[in-house]
Structure formats: C-alpha cells, structure tokens
Image (cartoon, helix red, strand yellow):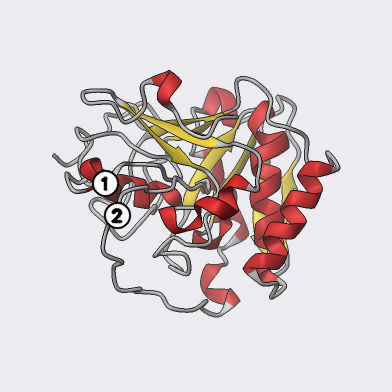
Amino acid sequence: MLERFVSIAEGGFPGAVRGNLRTKGVGRLAARLTACTAALLAVTGAVAAPAVPYPRMATVDAYLMDRAQEIALARSAAPESISKDATVLVLTRTGYETAATGTNGFVCWVARSFSGAPDWVERWNPKVRAAACENPQAARTVTAIATLRTAMTLAGRTDAEVADRVRAALRSKEIPPLAAGAMCYMMSKSSYLSDDGGHDMAHLMFYIPSRDGASWGANAPGSPVLGGNYWFYTAEHQAEAAALPPLSVLLVGVPTWSDGTPAIHPM
C-alpha cells in the first residue's frame, strides 16, 4: 500500500509507523495495507487528521462481489501451491461464509475496508478488495477476529459493541490466543488495498503478540520491515488498544506477485 516500495514495504493491513516515517511517505503504504487484514497498524505520530473521503457505510451491495470472482481473487493472494488446497471464504450480506473447504489449514479471503481497524480513513471505501491467505496459526485467531468484526458491522453493531464482543471471545478462548508463526500472504496483483499510490503491493504480513515490532527491527532506518498495532490505525485509541491483547502486524514487501511475475512498485 505504500506509494513507495522503497520507503517500504510497509504495512500489511497497517501499522505503527512513527510520525517521522509517515512524513516521508511510509504512512501511505500503511494506510493501504490497513485494509488486510485488517489490520491495522496504528500510526503513532502526531499528524493532522485528513478529510474523511468515505464518511459513512455504502449500501451492502457495493461491497459484495460475484461469488466465482471472489473465490478466484481470494486464491490469488498466495502462490497456487498454497491456495489451491486452502479454505476459501466469501462475503455475504451477513458476513463471511465458507465457499470451499480446504485441506492444508490456510484460509484465503478478500477483506473489505471495514474488516479491520475502525479508525482507518478509508474504512467505508467500497473499492477495497484486499485478497489475503492466512496460514493455520493466523486463520484461527486473526481471520476469526476479522470475520467476527465484519459480521457485527454488517449487523449494525457499534464499534464499542464490536470491541466488547471481540474481548469476550478472546477472554473465553472462543477465539484462541495467537500462535507462534502466524502470517499472511497478500501477493495478489488484482487487489485494491487503498486509494493511495498504485492501489496494491505484493507483501507478506506477520502477526506477533507484542505491542510493537522493535524485536524485529520494524520501522528502524533502512529496515525493510514495517509494523504497527493491529487493533487501531491512529494513536488516539492507545487506551482502547491497551485493553486488548498485545497484537502487532509486521509487513515485508516481496518482489513478485503470486503468479511469479515481477511486482514493480512505484518509487
């Protein structure tokens, strides 16, 4: 999602990109990725709030896709060797449902703008189609959180109600704690991650049970790893994020799309 792959590779479904990095353009990538998984990554720098281009939810029809096209887009998130045996979810008027049952534990799906951070400026952008393929560890936790958020949002629940329900599900272990090695492929050349830049970026995301990605060198000068808070995109919600289990998203750009063709990112 960043306009610049160089300033990197950031975010996958967003991230905690400090203000100094954001001013250099990294924030745009994070914004794009916030859609992923989202995700998103919480930008912690003090930045003037941008105008909200999508102030309210569009009609549900605007977010739906042809079923066959959605299945194909979901599978394109990862190389065929992985996605061909993955479970595939598709969005309906009431939430995600299983369209194909896989055998390898991976779950491929197409995130919509409201599947992730509730404070993302493009939260209601109906153009967002973020193809993701989560490994078994991520699917059990991160995909479960995103699909729960999505179903409750479509049911008209408030952000506070959604947060309370997610907390309860994590506390009761209805949604299990994040397992080591949780990650996600976002390598589809047909995704639309954000209105920014080229609208898409081939990357991998890694989920860690931490409040930041310092142990990975995330956001350090010259590091190809970008990261941020999963729960919220902006710093204004730090107190709310603190009430949820530590969860960060780390993003690393990759040089090819899932079909093996070169992924050229605008500089």
Q: Label 1: which residue?
A: 19
Circle 2 residue: 46
Q: Residue at x 74, y 59 (%)?
A: 164
Residue nearest the viewer, comparing 143 with 86: 143
Residue 256 falls left or right of residue 235: left
The residue under the point 48% across, 48% down is 40
Which quadrant, please, contains the C terminus?
Answer: top left
Disc nearer the start of the sequence (1/2): 1
Q: Residues within 10 Å of mark 2 (few under 14, many from 20)?
A: few
Secondary element type, mark 2 = loop
* Furthest-left residue in this view: 267
Measuring from the top left, give residue 240's x and y in whole percent. 59, 54
Residue closer to the observer: 255 or 250: 250
Instruction: Give 191 or 145, whichever is nearer the viewer.
Output: 145
Return the residue found at the far front.
239
Evaluate whether residue 2 shows in this view. Answer: no
Name the disc covering residue 132, or none: none
Q: Amino acid at mark 1?
A: Gly
Eyeballing the image, is 113 above or below 93? above
Which quadrant holds residue 179?
top right
Q: Is residue 230 left or right of residue 90?
A: left
Query: In the structure shown, which secondary structural element does the residue marked by tag 1 occupy?
Result: helix
* Three-letter code, disc 2: Ala
